[in-house]
Amino acid sequence: MNKNKAKGERRIKRHKRVRSSVTGTPSRPRLAVYKSVKHMHAQIIDDLAGRTLVSASSVESEGSAEGKTGNSKSAAAVGKLIAERAKKAGIAQVCFDRGGFMFHGRVKALADAARAEGLKF
């Protein structure tokens, strides 16, 4: 088995464990984070209705910091953007879904920036 494929499968197993305890409701939706080598993606999801309420990504031009999208500054910009859009949608509290990724580096930068903008989790 390829080393990278095994690594991805382990992340998916961790994500399933996280998702067994984290569920988005209309009053407290789920903030789901995904990171790839080049980009960060964040969505606020109502799992009961099965729909995405708000999303932000480093693929968007306003989400990138100095043109680089795979770093902590860009992740923080995505966190700030998702929090601003959540405020406009009337969302104040979320539960955080780290997506099977370790809570450090870019994932932590995104979470800290969202908290600094007033999103509670």
Image (tube, rainbow, N blue to C red):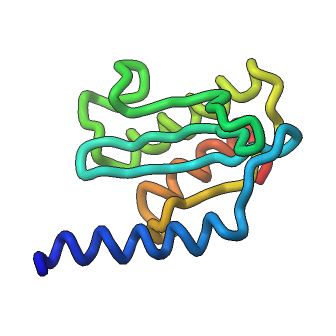
Q: Residue at x 39, y 39 (%)?
A: 74
Q: Is residue 13 above or below residue 27?
A: below
Which of 3/71 is in front? 3
Q: Is residue 63 above or below residue 29?
A: above
Residue 76, how many percent across, how many down? 49, 42
Q: Residue at x 38, y 22 (%)?
A: 60
Q: Is residue 85 above or below residue 77?
A: above
Q: Residue at x 53, y 48 (%)?
A: 110
Q: Is residue 69 above or below residue 15?
A: above
Residue 10, how many percent across, how many down? 36, 77
Point out the image quarter for the C terminus: bottom right
Residue 47, how many percent across, how many down? 71, 44
Q: Is residue 81 left or right of residue 10?
A: right
Q: Residue lying at the far right in this picture: please name it.
A: 27
Question: Dividing the picture into quarters, in which one does residue 45 lie?
Answer: top right
Point out the image quarter for the N terminus: bottom left
Q: Residue at x 32, y 72 (%)?
A: 9
Q: Residue lying at the far left in this picture: please name it.
A: 2
Which of 103/21 is in front? 21
Residue 88, how many percent across, how many down? 74, 18
Q: Is residue 30 left or right of residue 57?
A: right
Q: Is residue 82 left or right of residue 68?
A: right
Q: Is residue 95 left or right of residue 81?
A: right
